[in-house]
Image (tube, rainbow, N blue to C red):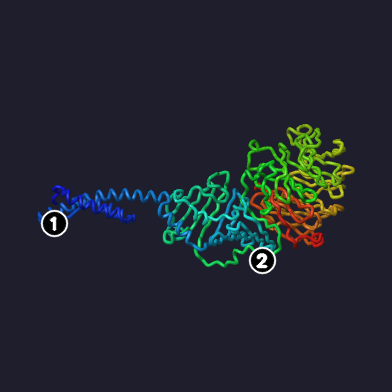
Amino acid sequence: MNNERYPHDSESGDSMLDEAVRTLLAQPVPEDAIQRVKSRAVLLANPSTVALPSDHASRTRRWKASRALVGGLTVAASVLIAVAGVTLFLDRSGGRAFARVIENVNATRSAHCKTATRFGHQREIDGQLYLEGNRLRLEQFNGLLIQVGDLDQKQALFLDMNHKVAQSAKIDASLAREFANPIDQLRHANTKNAERIGEEILRGRRTQVYKLHKVDLLGMKGDGEMLLWVDVESELPAKIVVHDPDPKAEMEMRFDEFVWNEPLDARMFSLSIPDGFQKGIVFVNPPPPEPAQLGVGSPESPSALVDGIFSSDRVPVRIVWGRPETTITALMQDPESVPPLSRRANELRQWDVATGKLRWSEKIAGASSVAGTTDGKSLATVIGYEVQLRDAASGKITRKWVTDKALSPLAFSPDGKTLAAGITEWGPFGGSGGKQSGGVQFWDVERATLLRTISDDKPITFVTYSSNGKYLATSSNEGPVKLWDVATGELTRIFPGLFQADFSPDGKTIACQVAASSADKTIGRVDLYDLRDGSLVKSFTSDKGVSASNMLCVRFSPDGHLLAASDWNGTVSLWNVATGQREQTIGVQRAGVHSVAFAPDGRTMAIGSEDKTLRLWKLPAEMIEPGLEKK
């Protein structure tokens, strides 16, 4: 093959190049066309790969034309590469492709998708989301909880489908997160905040993946990020993931399997209370409030009653209701996952039940117990060797005294005149001779004088009075439950329980949490004993039976109709005491439930969990004893 080089025809080449450039600049260049031209330019740039005619003159003309075309196409390819670079840059930063997505979203009438929400280490909540304009409907917990919101009217409706309870509310800052609308976020998105980060085959369809910065959703105030999977054919979202890049927030919400422009029944978005529903408080499971909303010590903390959550930043390990049920006080501490040396001082906090506002907060160092008088006027805490009496209205200390023993659990006598304090000295450093020691000290509240001490061979971690003040029940972490005669200090009975116990309101029986033992199948069980002869009356077993973990707290309702027990597996079981039947199991979270406390009227239950939430749960009307319901 003749490899002789011929002079370049500059005039012919320039005209061809000019025409090529004008053509390129006149219209957008598809990406596949860019690749074809680049490949062709490389091919023509190598003469050895071009077959020339045998005729010399013809070869000369063809070679000139080829060289001219090579020159033109080489430069054209450079232009194409530059244009392609601009095109890729536009795609990388959002560009025309993302702008078309926004246009298509704005043109849609409705959307339907699946949702999955996770806040911190809480259980993921699945649901269905229906959108039509600025109206939305969110169905969660298999449709048992429905939230309807109109973002234009700023009005919302909550429906508890299980208990037929409805609640209307105004969508303010505290409720804005409940009605997160990713489509509305896209309608107002700025293409400059979009970045194309790749492709993915999603359920058999090719999607382009974008990252959208400066998202103002779920209360993130422009600090959030949105990942967006766009179907290449429809140019509409196929999946959206919204999350807060701040690791402390631990929040993510997914919207998946979109169905666009599906006809939706207008009644789905009605804000009217349906027939058969009664007005009340509907408890939902919202994201935790921002730290500023918790406002420790600030009376301006917003109401959280609509979602049933009073606090979500620390663990409520002890709960005390006020009398009447106008206030609720809780001892708050860091979760067990926080190393001991990194834990903050414990706090005592009190909220107003009607508004959900925090009334006061007091730091109480390492105190791990709080007790309240039956009239709701006084509280007691203990820090090591110091007992502190507090005014319940303000949380301030009114009287304190020092003891000769390390104390922890506390209980007021029914008349409020005596305070029982469990002795908790652990070996090898505590107690006589470096051994563990326990017992109970009884203190005269008015005079701050020691009335009596009873001794035990184990540190006492729990104490409680019977309703008539005749008996005191104590327990250690390892058990057993011991029954003491308050007047004489005599040990009268021992029951095979541990952690905590509770007397029935009529003073005839005691409920004890049974020690965990898979061998004799006693895990997840509460036994009820007769105080007169110590006989077993009946047993109550959790719904998970032997697969359940240790129970942590057991409580009778004020009328003795119900018995509640919380578990480290994150549930609260409720039994009918008369029938022994389990009425309901409340799944709180995967974290353990430390404390359960019935309101004095028996209609509401406060639940404190290791997931750092203090919840209120309204008892269903059919679970309340008819006589109590009429009061």
Q: Which is more toward the observer, 7 or 473?
A: 7
Q: Give coordinates of residue 262: x percent, y percent.
A: 51, 66
Instruction: Identify the residue at horizontal 58%, vertical 43% (top origin).
Output: 248
**Residue type for callout 1:** Pro
Gap in angstroms between the C-alphas marked 2 and 1: 87 Å
Q: Residue furthest left?
A: 56
Q: Give coordinates of residue 619: x percent, y percent.
A: 73, 58
Instruction: Identify the residue at horizontal 80%, vertical 49% (top origin).
Output: 323
**Residue type for callout 2:** Pro
Q: Quadrant of the C terminus?
A: bottom right
Which residue carries the number 2 mark? 274
Please identify, in this view, whether the residue under mark 2 or under mark 1 is nearer the observer.
2
Which residue carries the number 1 mark? 53
Left or right: where does residue 551 sit relative to residue 224?
A: right
The tag on residue 339 is: none
Q: Give coordinates of residue 563: x percent, y percent.
A: 77, 55
Q: Which is more toward the observer, 254 or 526?
A: 254
Instruction: Identify the residue at horizontal 28%, vertical 52% (top origin).
Output: 38
